Protein backbone atom coordinates (compact mmCIF):
# COMPACT_ATOMS: atom_id res chain seq x y z
CA UNK A 1 0.00 0.00 0.00
CA UNK A 2 2.80 2.45 0.89
CA UNK A 3 4.60 1.69 -2.37
CA UNK A 4 1.40 2.35 -4.31
CA UNK A 5 1.02 5.72 -2.57
CA UNK A 6 4.62 6.71 -3.34
CA UNK A 7 4.14 5.65 -6.95
CA UNK A 8 1.00 7.82 -7.14
CA UNK A 9 2.76 10.85 -5.66
CA UNK A 10 5.67 10.40 -8.06
CA UNK A 11 3.48 10.12 -11.15
CA UNK A 12 1.50 13.16 -10.01
CA UNK A 13 4.76 15.15 -9.71
CA UNK A 14 4.44 15.93 -6.01
CA UNK A 15 7.41 17.77 -4.48
CA UNK A 16 10.39 15.39 -4.18
CA UNK A 17 11.02 16.43 -0.57
CA UNK A 18 7.42 15.61 0.31
CA UNK A 19 7.71 12.20 -1.36
CA UNK A 20 10.83 11.52 0.71
CA UNK A 21 8.95 12.63 3.81
CA UNK A 22 6.20 10.10 3.05
CA UNK A 23 8.79 7.43 2.29
CA UNK A 24 10.41 7.88 5.70
CA UNK A 25 7.47 8.87 7.92
CA UNK A 26 4.36 7.18 6.52
CA UNK A 27 3.83 3.89 8.42
CA UNK A 28 3.99 0.68 6.37
CA UNK A 29 0.89 -0.55 8.19
CA UNK A 30 -0.98 2.76 8.22
CA UNK A 31 -4.62 2.46 9.19
CA UNK A 32 -6.67 5.63 8.74
CA UNK A 33 -8.31 6.97 11.87
CA UNK A 34 -11.33 7.96 9.76
CA UNK A 35 -12.83 5.83 7.01
CA UNK A 36 -14.06 7.85 4.02
CA UNK A 37 -13.52 11.24 5.69
CA UNK A 38 -15.44 13.15 3.04
CA UNK A 39 -18.69 11.39 3.74
CA UNK A 40 -18.98 13.74 6.74
CA UNK A 41 -20.24 17.31 6.47
CA UNK A 42 -18.27 20.37 7.52
CA UNK A 43 -17.71 21.91 10.04
CA UNK A 44 -18.37 18.66 11.94
CA UNK A 45 -16.04 16.53 9.82
CA UNK A 46 -13.75 14.56 12.19
CA UNK A 47 -10.89 15.12 9.76
CA UNK A 48 -10.51 18.58 11.31
CA UNK A 49 -9.86 17.06 14.74
CA UNK A 50 -6.81 15.08 13.60
CA UNK A 51 -3.23 16.17 14.21
CA UNK A 52 -1.45 17.90 11.33
CA UNK A 53 0.46 14.72 10.47
CA UNK A 54 -2.53 12.39 10.72
CA UNK A 55 -4.58 14.73 8.55
CA UNK A 56 -1.98 14.65 5.78
CA UNK A 57 -1.49 10.90 6.07
CA UNK A 58 -5.24 10.35 5.86
CA UNK A 59 -5.53 12.51 2.73
CA UNK A 60 -2.60 10.73 1.09
CA UNK A 61 -4.09 7.33 1.96
CA UNK A 62 -7.39 8.41 0.37
CA UNK A 63 -5.65 8.68 -3.01
CA UNK A 64 -5.97 4.90 -3.32
CA UNK A 65 -9.80 4.76 -3.26
CA UNK A 66 -9.87 7.93 -5.37
CA UNK A 67 -7.85 6.15 -8.07
CA UNK A 68 -10.37 3.28 -7.95
CA UNK A 69 -13.15 5.77 -8.59
CA UNK A 70 -11.35 7.18 -11.64
CA UNK A 71 -10.76 3.63 -12.89
CA UNK A 72 -14.43 2.76 -12.42
CA UNK A 73 -15.29 5.60 -14.82
CA UNK A 74 -12.51 4.59 -17.23
CA UNK A 75 -10.96 8.04 -16.86
CA UNK A 76 -7.40 8.08 -18.28
CA UNK A 77 -4.55 7.91 -15.76
CA UNK A 78 -3.02 11.18 -16.97
CA UNK A 79 -6.19 13.07 -15.96
CA UNK A 80 -6.12 11.42 -12.53
CA UNK A 81 -2.52 12.44 -11.90
CA UNK A 82 -2.99 15.95 -13.30
CA UNK A 83 -6.04 16.46 -11.07
CA UNK A 84 -4.01 15.91 -7.90
CA UNK A 85 -2.00 19.07 -8.51
CA UNK A 86 -4.07 21.19 -6.12
CA UNK A 87 -3.48 18.75 -3.25
CA UNK A 88 0.27 19.08 -3.78
CA UNK A 89 0.00 22.87 -4.01
CA UNK A 90 -1.87 23.22 -0.72
CA UNK A 91 0.44 20.83 1.17
CA UNK A 92 3.50 22.72 -0.06
CA UNK A 93 1.95 26.09 0.78
CA UNK A 94 1.31 24.90 4.34
CA UNK A 95 4.94 23.81 4.60
CA UNK A 96 6.24 27.18 3.39
CA UNK A 97 4.21 28.97 6.08
CA UNK A 98 4.48 26.51 8.99
CA UNK A 99 7.66 24.50 8.40
CA UNK A 100 5.81 21.17 8.38
CA UNK A 101 3.61 19.32 5.92
CA UNK A 102 -0.10 19.79 6.46
CA UNK A 103 -3.27 21.45 5.22
CA UNK A 104 -5.41 24.13 6.81
CA UNK A 105 -9.00 23.41 7.80
CA UNK A 106 -10.10 25.66 4.95
CA UNK A 107 -7.98 23.68 2.48
CA UNK A 108 -9.30 20.40 3.85
CA UNK A 109 -12.80 21.70 3.16
CA UNK A 110 -11.90 22.74 -0.40
CA UNK A 111 -10.17 19.45 -1.21
CA UNK A 112 -13.43 17.56 -0.72
CA UNK A 113 -14.26 18.36 -4.35
CA UNK A 114 -11.21 16.44 -5.55
CA UNK A 115 -11.76 13.48 -3.23
CA UNK A 116 -15.41 13.25 -4.24
CA UNK A 117 -14.35 13.00 -7.88
CA UNK A 118 -15.88 16.33 -8.91
CA UNK A 119 -12.87 18.42 -10.01
CA UNK A 120 -10.57 17.67 -12.92
CA UNK A 121 -7.56 19.45 -14.42
CA UNK A 122 -8.01 19.61 -18.18
CA UNK A 123 -5.40 21.63 -20.01
CA UNK A 124 -4.90 25.12 -18.60
CA UNK A 125 -8.05 25.16 -16.46
CA UNK A 126 -9.71 23.21 -13.68
CA UNK A 127 -13.33 22.12 -14.14
CA UNK A 128 -15.87 21.10 -11.51
CA UNK A 129 -18.97 18.99 -11.97
CA UNK A 130 -21.50 21.09 -10.07
CA UNK A 131 -25.14 22.09 -9.75
CA UNK A 132 -26.12 25.74 -9.88
CA UNK A 133 -26.22 27.34 -6.44
CA UNK A 134 -27.41 30.83 -5.54
CA UNK A 135 -25.43 30.58 -2.31
CA UNK A 136 -22.23 29.87 -4.26
CA UNK A 137 -22.78 32.99 -6.39
CA UNK A 138 -23.74 35.29 -3.50
CA UNK A 139 -21.59 33.93 -0.65
CA UNK A 140 -21.11 36.00 2.51
CA UNK A 141 -18.82 38.47 4.30
CA UNK A 142 -16.18 40.24 2.16
CA UNK A 143 -16.93 37.93 -0.78
CA UNK A 144 -20.65 38.79 -0.92
CA UNK A 145 -22.11 39.44 -4.37
CA UNK A 146 -25.83 40.08 -4.90
CA UNK A 147 -27.61 37.87 -7.43
CA UNK A 148 -30.73 39.37 -8.98
CA UNK A 149 -34.16 37.76 -8.90
CA UNK A 150 -34.15 37.86 -12.70
CA UNK A 151 -30.99 35.77 -12.87
CA UNK A 152 -32.25 33.40 -10.17
CA UNK A 153 -35.23 32.64 -12.41
CA UNK A 154 -33.01 32.22 -15.44
CA UNK A 155 -30.61 29.84 -13.69
CA UNK A 156 -32.65 27.45 -11.52
CA UNK A 157 -31.19 26.13 -8.30
CA UNK A 158 -29.72 22.67 -8.85
CA UNK A 159 -29.32 22.92 -12.63
CA UNK A 160 -26.32 20.85 -13.84
CA UNK A 161 -23.40 23.13 -14.71
CA UNK A 162 -19.61 23.05 -14.92
CA UNK A 163 -17.66 25.46 -12.73
CA UNK A 164 -14.40 26.84 -14.12
CA UNK A 165 -11.47 27.38 -11.76
CA UNK A 166 -8.27 29.24 -12.65
CA UNK A 167 -4.99 28.10 -11.14
CA UNK A 168 -2.46 30.72 -10.08
CA UNK A 169 -0.08 29.92 -12.95
CA UNK A 170 -2.71 29.08 -15.57
CA UNK A 171 -1.76 29.62 -19.21
CA UNK A 172 -4.50 31.99 -20.38
CA UNK A 173 -3.42 32.29 -24.00
CA UNK A 174 -6.57 32.10 -26.13
CA UNK A 175 -5.55 28.93 -27.96
CA UNK A 176 -4.90 27.19 -24.63
CA UNK A 177 -8.28 28.27 -23.26
CA UNK A 178 -10.01 27.07 -26.44
CA UNK A 179 -8.31 23.71 -25.96
CA UNK A 180 -9.32 23.49 -22.29
CA UNK A 181 -13.01 24.12 -22.93
CA UNK A 182 -13.02 21.56 -25.74
CA UNK A 183 -11.30 19.04 -23.46
CA UNK A 184 -13.85 19.76 -20.72
CA UNK A 185 -16.86 19.27 -22.98
CA UNK A 186 -15.47 16.02 -24.37
CA UNK A 187 -14.51 14.83 -20.87
CA UNK A 188 -17.86 15.39 -19.18
CA UNK A 189 -19.96 14.12 -22.08
CA UNK A 190 -17.78 10.98 -22.24
CA UNK A 191 -17.20 10.10 -18.58
CA UNK A 192 -20.21 11.78 -16.91
CA UNK A 193 -22.91 11.69 -19.63
CA UNK A 194 -25.61 11.82 -16.95
CA UNK A 195 -24.43 15.31 -15.97
CA UNK A 196 -26.16 17.19 -18.76
CA UNK A 197 -24.63 20.58 -18.08
CA UNK A 198 -26.22 23.70 -19.57
CA UNK A 199 -23.46 26.29 -19.00
CA UNK A 200 -19.91 26.80 -17.86
CA UNK A 201 -19.77 29.23 -14.94
CA UNK A 202 -16.91 31.17 -13.40
CA UNK A 203 -16.77 33.51 -10.39
CA UNK A 204 -13.57 35.52 -10.22
CA UNK A 205 -11.99 38.96 -10.04
CA UNK A 206 -10.77 38.47 -13.63
CA UNK A 207 -14.31 38.83 -14.99
CA UNK A 208 -15.06 42.15 -13.27
CA UNK A 209 -15.68 44.53 -16.22
CA UNK A 210 -13.94 47.69 -14.86
CA UNK A 211 -10.73 45.68 -14.32
CA UNK A 212 -10.38 45.42 -18.09
CA UNK A 213 -9.72 49.20 -18.13
CA UNK A 214 -6.42 48.50 -16.38
CA UNK A 215 -5.28 46.00 -19.00
CA UNK A 216 -4.08 46.32 -22.60
CA UNK A 217 -6.64 45.29 -25.24
CA UNK A 218 -4.61 42.20 -26.14
CA UNK A 219 -4.41 41.01 -22.52
CA UNK A 220 -5.01 37.29 -21.99
CA UNK A 221 -7.16 38.15 -18.96
CA UNK A 222 -9.35 40.41 -21.10
CA UNK A 223 -9.61 37.73 -23.78
CA UNK A 224 -10.65 35.21 -21.13
CA UNK A 225 -13.20 37.59 -19.57
CA UNK A 226 -14.76 38.42 -22.93
CA UNK A 227 -15.83 34.81 -23.36
CA UNK A 228 -18.37 35.16 -20.56
CA UNK A 229 -21.75 36.79 -20.24
CA UNK A 230 -21.61 38.57 -16.88
CA UNK A 231 -24.56 37.68 -14.61
CA UNK A 232 -23.52 39.31 -11.31
CA UNK A 233 -20.89 41.77 -10.05
CA UNK A 234 -19.76 43.49 -6.89
CA UNK A 235 -16.99 45.96 -6.14
CA UNK A 236 -15.14 44.16 -3.36
CA UNK A 237 -11.40 44.35 -3.81
CA UNK A 238 -10.04 41.63 -1.51
CA UNK A 239 -10.04 38.73 -3.97
CA UNK A 240 -8.35 40.78 -6.69
CA UNK A 241 -5.70 42.10 -4.31
CA UNK A 242 -5.06 38.63 -2.87
CA UNK A 243 -4.64 37.14 -6.35
CA UNK A 244 -2.51 39.93 -7.78
CA UNK A 245 -0.32 40.60 -4.71
CA UNK A 246 -0.89 37.52 -2.48
CA UNK A 247 -2.12 39.93 0.21
CA UNK A 248 -4.82 42.55 0.63
CA UNK A 249 -2.76 44.59 3.13
CA UNK A 250 -2.37 47.95 1.38
CA UNK A 251 0.69 48.96 3.40
CA UNK A 252 2.44 45.76 2.33
CA UNK A 253 1.34 46.18 -1.27
CA UNK A 254 2.65 49.73 -1.50
CA UNK A 255 6.11 48.60 -0.33
CA UNK A 256 6.49 45.46 -2.45
CA UNK A 257 8.25 45.25 -5.79
CA UNK A 258 5.64 45.02 -8.56
CA UNK A 259 6.10 42.07 -10.91
CA UNK A 260 3.67 42.99 -13.70
CA UNK A 261 2.05 45.98 -15.39
CA UNK A 262 -1.24 45.10 -13.67
CA UNK A 263 0.46 44.99 -10.27
CA UNK A 264 1.86 48.46 -10.96
CA UNK A 265 -1.60 50.02 -11.30
CA UNK A 266 -4.22 47.81 -9.61
CA UNK A 267 -3.72 49.02 -6.01
CA UNK A 268 -3.89 52.64 -7.21
CA UNK A 269 -7.28 51.99 -8.85
CA UNK A 270 -9.36 50.18 -6.26
CA UNK A 271 -12.54 51.42 -7.90
CA UNK A 272 -11.63 49.21 -10.88
CA UNK A 273 -11.31 46.03 -8.81
CA UNK A 274 -14.12 43.69 -7.88
CA UNK A 275 -15.56 40.27 -8.54
CA UNK A 276 -17.99 38.97 -11.13
CA UNK A 277 -19.76 35.79 -12.14
CA UNK A 278 -20.22 34.83 -15.77
CA UNK A 279 -21.53 32.03 -17.96
CA UNK A 280 -20.67 30.42 -21.28
CA UNK A 281 -23.37 28.27 -22.97
CA UNK A 282 -22.88 24.53 -23.36
CA UNK A 283 -20.64 23.67 -26.27
CA UNK A 284 -21.94 21.83 -29.31
CA UNK A 285 -20.61 18.31 -29.74
Image (cartoon, rainbow, N blue to C red):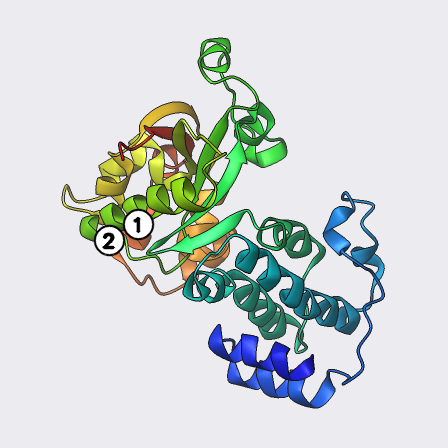
Left of 260 or right of it: where is 144? right
Point out residue 99 in the picture as x, y percentages from the top left corner: 66, 78
Report the residue at 42% width, 42% height from top. 188
Q: Is residue 268 visible?
A: no
With 232 as the anchor, is 43 left or right in this view? Answer: right
- Image quarter where the N terminus lies is bottom right
Q: Could you say where residue 19 lies in the image, as x and y percent from the top left?
A: 58, 83
The image quadrant that residue 190 belongs to is top left
Q: Residues within 10 Å of mark 2 (few under 14, many from 20)?
A: some
Residue sitting at the far left:
218
Secondary structure, mark 2, is helix
Q: Which residue is mark 2?
A: 176
Of residues 74 and 83, the one drawn nearer to the viewer in this rendering: 74
Circle 1/circle 2 CB separation < 8 Å: yes
Which residue is labeled 1 in the image?
Answer: 180
Residue 161, position in %: x, y? Answer: 46, 31
113 lies left or right of 119: right
Distance CA(mark 1)–CA(mark 2): 6 Å
Amino acid sequence: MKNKIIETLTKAHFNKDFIEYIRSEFPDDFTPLIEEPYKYDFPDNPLLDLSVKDKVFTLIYELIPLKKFFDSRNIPDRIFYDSLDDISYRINRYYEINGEYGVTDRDALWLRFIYKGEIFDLGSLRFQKFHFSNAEIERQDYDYMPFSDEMKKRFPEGEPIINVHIQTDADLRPEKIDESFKLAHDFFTTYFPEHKYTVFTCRTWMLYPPTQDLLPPDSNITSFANRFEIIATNQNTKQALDRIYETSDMAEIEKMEKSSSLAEVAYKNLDKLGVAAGVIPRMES
